[in-house]
Amino acid sequence: MTPHELVAILDKHERWLAKKPGGIRANLAMVDLQGMHLAGSTLESCKLSGAILTGCDMTNANLSYSDLFAAHMTKADMSGCNLYRADLRGAHMRGARLKGAILREADLRGGALLDRRSSGTSVLKSDLTGANFDDALLARANLSGADMSEVSMSGADCQGAIMTGVNLSGSNIKNANLSKADLKGVNLSGANLSGAILRDCNLAGAILAGAILKNADLLGAKLDGVDLSGADCTGANIARSAENFSLKIQRSLESHFNWINSNGSTGQRADLQGEDLAHIDLSGVNLSGANLKGIKLVGANVSESLMVMSDLSLSDLRECNLSNSTLDGTNFRGSDLSGARLDGAELGSVDIKGPTGKATGRMWPANLSGTKLIGASLVRTNLRGANLSEADLSYADLTDAILIDANIKGVNMEGAKLEGAVLPARVDDDD
């Protein structure tokens, strides 16, 4: 098709849209338009199924409601293009530029295409490999099963999008909004989701090996069957309810609740030694006296909890939120609390009582000997009388912390913030 013929068709199409005499809806299905200049064109409701639009300039074109079923748009420039409710099933958009494009409610699923060389049909996946969707609007779009490996979706709005089974491996999804999106079974291996919003989305069965989730917000996200061990979740807001964990863990927590509330007459003290409770939400829980030795609570939310005289020795508590918790007499010996938040927490001593309930005059201090608190936040934390011997508090924030009578023998405080902190009187190390 010559440029002159194309211009005539587009002119009649615009007249058709405006309901003017001589208007005819553009039918460019299966037409070879490779490399054509369509920037700013009005192609709303146009028929372009199977069309070859490879390398076309379609910047800021209006393709809303258009039929682009199985169209070839490899390396086409569709920046700022309006594709609202467009039919893009089975479309080939490998390496296309869609920066700032509007794909709200667009259909990008695979599609069945009649094969003229046989009597059957073939199902084509939408191929969006390496496409640029930066700042694009994909809210409520249907991308089920599409190949979006190595795409760039930085800052894209994908709220409520249907992306089940999508291949997003190696993609750049930094700062994108995927809240309430259906991402069941999605492949996000090696994807960069730093700062992404994934609130209330469905990530059940998703693959996140090697994914970067730094500072991402996954509050309320469904994570059934998801393995986060290979992902970088530094600073991520991930809260998994107890219902997302095994029945053994759920029953142990329930039994401990009964044990606490009945003063030991019913239920049983929780024994969760060595269990993996990474990113669990246990805010406000009472786990006092529980055996949590060697537990994994990476990124967990245990804020405003009660864990008096609990055993958390040799545990992995990196990035754990323990702010405003009561942890008097708790044993953290040898645990890793790097990057943990203990702002406003109580880590003092417990007054030991005898069999009759009377005070013995002996105190049981919180034990943080040999712990790693590198970069931890201990703003206004009460560590009075705590044992911090040989602990690593390098670059920790101890602003306004209370360390009166604390044992800080051999403590590493290199780079720590100590403004307003009340430190114990210096005691020289023994020879």
Image (cartoon, rainbow, N blue to C red):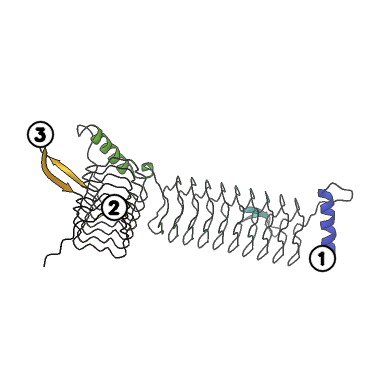
Query: Callout 1: helix, strand or loop?
Result: helix
Q: Residues within 10 Å of mark 3 (few under 14, many from 20)?
A: few
Marks 3 and 1 sit apart, C-alpha to C-alpha, by 98 Å
Residue type indicated by callout 1: Pro
Mark 2 lies on residue: 401
Query: Callout 2: helix, strand or loop?
Result: loop
Mark 1 lies on residue: 3
Rendering coords of residue 93 (x, y %): 64, 61
Q: Earlier in the sequence, mark 3 or mark 1?
A: 1
Query: Callout 3: helix, strand or loop?
Result: loop
Nearer mark to the viewer, of 3 and 2: 2
Q: Residues within 10 Å of mark 1 (few under 14, many from 20)?
A: few
Residue type indicated by callout 2: Ala
Residue drawn at 10 percent across, 34 percent down = 356
Rendering coords of residue 226 (x, y %): 42, 51
Query: Is residue 99 left or right of 348 when viewed as pictured?
Result: right
